[in-house]
Image (cartoon, rainbow, N blue to C red):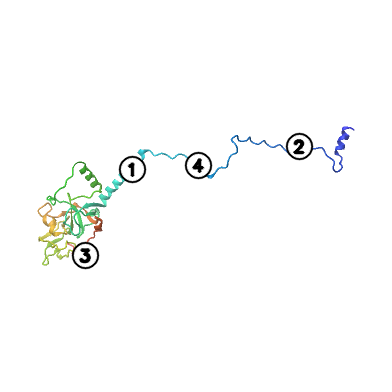
């Protein structure tokens, strides 16, 4: 049989159940890539949630460290800012003062702490009935005992007073009630022992219980730019009545007024706002 005959014989149909030539194995089952080599450390175990957290924490950037001088600088800035704010409040808004004597009882008693508004008289007018803090016009406090500190104590007190933290003491300031404003004619006493302003007697509800309006008669006209002041404890107050022989003849220059008392802040059981008793002077005409 020739080769052509053999090829023809291969193309002829075969009886059922006859075996044909086996096809190439590689054509039926293509080669697969070889598996990765086994991990010599053995099979890995599944990661637990805690392991993931630990791994995350391990790879986090370390927290930046703060230098000591940075903290000191921040504290210094806060302290300086607080001191500046305190100074501005004392200069333009309110300033604390301590009451040194009994001259304003029962409205104020010794060692009370009050806040005085610095808006008066700089931006607001002084009115009759206001309780004002003012610098000594000259000689009013000459007989007052002076309690002077020395050295570092004095320096500390001066600094704290300057920035407004420490109350101003009685070495330079007084506190009294305004009874006469510029142009007022103030007299005492009428037939019932009362003080009169511009010819109208006033019922002074704020004076200490049991006190007479004045045991000393007076008849004055308040000059321009000045005030006539009296203490609420009339029998124990070195006020305008008793300083007629001093500079200003007992009148307080408006420029000496530091402010009006607006609140009692210490002790706490006496803390309260201080309001002008306007009804006392409501019938008093303008000068």
Q: Residues within 10 Å of mark 4 (few under 14, many from 20)?
A: few
Say which of 33 and 283 sits in front: 33
Indicate which disc residue 54 carries.
Answer: 4
**Residue designated by label 3:** 279
Q: Nearer the viewer, mark 1 or mark 2?
A: 2
Q: Earlier in the sequence, mark 4 or mark 1?
A: 4
Up the image or down, 276 lies above or below 164; here it is below
Q: Residues within 10 Å of mark 3 (few under 14, many from 20)?
A: few
Residue 99: image location, x then y, percent: 19, 53
Question: For the residues marked 1 and 3, what is the alpha-carbon distance in whole angstroms?
Answer: 51 Å
Question: For the residues marked 3 and 2, what is the alpha-carbon distance in whole angstroms?
Answer: 122 Å
Up the image or down, 177 lies above or below 54; here it is below
Up the image or down, 198 lies above or below 252; here it is below
Q: Residues within 10 Å of mark 2 (few under 14, many from 20)?
A: few
Indicate which disc residue 25 carries.
Answer: 2
Residue 1: image location, x then y, percent: 90, 33
Q: Quadrant of residue 236?
A: bottom left
> Could you tell me if the residues under marks 3 and 2 are in contact, i.e. CB atoms within 8 Å?
no
Q: Nearer the viewer, mark 4 or mark 1?
A: 4
Q: Nearer the viewer, mark 3 or mark 2?
A: 2
């Amino acid at each position: 049989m020739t080769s052509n005959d053999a090829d023809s014989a291969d193309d002829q149909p075969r009886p059922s159940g006859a075996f044909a030539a086996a096809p190439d194995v590689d054509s039926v089952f293509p080669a697969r890539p070889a598996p990765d080599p086994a991990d010599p450390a053995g099979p890995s175990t599944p990661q637990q949630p805690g392991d993931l957290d630990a791994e995350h924490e391990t790879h986090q950037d370390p927290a930046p460290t703060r230098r000591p001088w940075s903290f000191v600088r921040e504290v210094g800035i806060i302290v300086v800012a607080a001191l500046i704010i305190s100074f501005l409040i004392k200069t333009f808004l309110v300033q604390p003062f301590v009451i040194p004597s009994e001259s304003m009882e029962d409205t104020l008693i010794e060692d009370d702490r009050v806040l005085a508004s610095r808006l008066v008289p700089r931006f607001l007018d002084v009115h009759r009935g206001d309780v004002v803090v003012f610098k000594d016009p000259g000689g009013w406090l000459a007989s007052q005992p002076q309690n002077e500190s020395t050295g570092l104590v004095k320096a500390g007190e001066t600094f704290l007073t300057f920035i407004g933290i420490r109350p101003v003491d009685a070495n330079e300031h007084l506190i009294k009630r305004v009874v006469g404003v510029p142009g007022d004619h103030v007299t005492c006493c009428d037939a019932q022992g009362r003080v009169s302003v511009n010819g109208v007697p006033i019922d002074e509800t704020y004076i200490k219980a049991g006190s007479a309006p004045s045991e000393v008669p007076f008849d004055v006209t308040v000059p321009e730019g000045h005030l006539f002041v009296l203490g609420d404890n009339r029998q124990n107050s070195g006020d305008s009545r008793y300083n007629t022989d001093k500079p200003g003849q007992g009148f307080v220059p408006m420029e000496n007024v530091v402010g009006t008392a607006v609140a009692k802040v210490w002790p706490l059981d006496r803390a309260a706002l201080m309001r002008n008793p306007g009804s006392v002077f409501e019938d008093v005409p303008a000068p």
